[in-house]
Amino acid sequence: MKKITLKNGESLLIRKVEKEDIDEVMQYMSLIGGESDNLTFGDGEWTVTYEQEINYIENVNTSNSIMLVAIIDGKIVGSTSLSAGTRSRVKHTGEMGITVRKAYWNCGIGSLLLGELLNFAKETKIIRKVNLIVKKDNLNAIKLYEKYGFKKEGLVTREFLVNGKFYDSVHMGLEID
Ligand SMILES: CC(C)(COP(=O)(O)OP(=O)(O)OC[C@H]1O[C@@H](n2cnc3c(N)ncnc32)[C@H](O)[C@@H]1OP(=O)(O)O)[C@@H](O)C(=O)NCCC(=O)NCCS
């Protein structure tokens, strides 16, 4: 758990997601799709049910996987997750994702969340590689990842189809010593 005072004076709490967050998580997920063209789902396209999400929250935090939420005044304003393999040959690799509510972009929350996620990854002593997929034109996110040492590893064509247009994706990765 981490408490930070933002430049605008608001206090931000970053912690692991808990079962009691379910209503906030459902609302958060349904809102972020409509705030960005850079996610795998758009407005109204978050179709995960309450039961599926509860099940996810109850099982997400393990020895090598995690979901963190960033909270201001009881409201989730950002989230990040690392989903690692379970089999011995892949449990050292995790796929990460990150989102922040649009009203809070450029306040440093994404950077704080990613820093905490990578601290967790290092502390596990299990995770040796963090992977992610980002839309090629999502330059702000790519900058954020590069700031933390992620390297571009490959380009996949037509991975996204947004508003009738195909977009390539960049696969990025960070090796953990
Ligand atoms: C990408 C995202 C998570 C960044 O979160 P954020 O809280 O706005 O980011 P921060 O304010 O912490 O900025 C972190 C870094 O990102 C980069 N960045 C963010 N916004 C930027 C902008 N408008 N211009 C240039 N760089 C930017 C910079 O490297 C910045 O580091 P710096 O402040 O040290 O220069 C957020 O914009 C978001 O949720 N976008 C929609 C969903 C999304 O694209 N998720 C990623 C999918 S792969």
Image (cartoon, grey):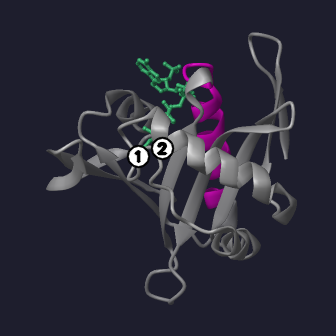
Nearer-the-camera pick, 23 or 112: 23
- In the picture shown, does residue 151 fall above or below 107? below
* Residue at the (32%, 29%) spot, across then down: 139
**Kind of residue indicated by mark 2:** Gly
Dot 2: what SS? Answer: helix
Q: Where does the image place residue 71, in percent across and percent down from the top left?
A: 78, 37
Q: Where does the image place residue 155, in percent across and percent down from the top left?
A: 17, 52
Q: Could you tell me how far apart the alpha carbons at marks 2 and 1 are, in whole angstroms?
A: 4 Å
Counting the numbered discs, the total is 2
* Residue at the (56%, 23%) spot, across then down: 105
> Magenta region, mostly helix, strand or loop?
helix
134 sits left or right of 168 in the view: right
Q: Residue furthest front?
A: 44
Mark number, residue 119 = none
Dot 1: what SS? Answer: loop
Nearer-the-camera pick, 117 or 19: 19
Q: Which residue is mark 1?
A: 42
Nearer-the-camera pick, 84 or 89: 84
Mark number, residue 33 = 2
Q: Which residues are magenta?
A: 104-122
Q: Is mark 2 within 8 Å of ligand 1?
A: no
Answer with mark 2 or mark 1, whichever residue precedes in sequence: 2
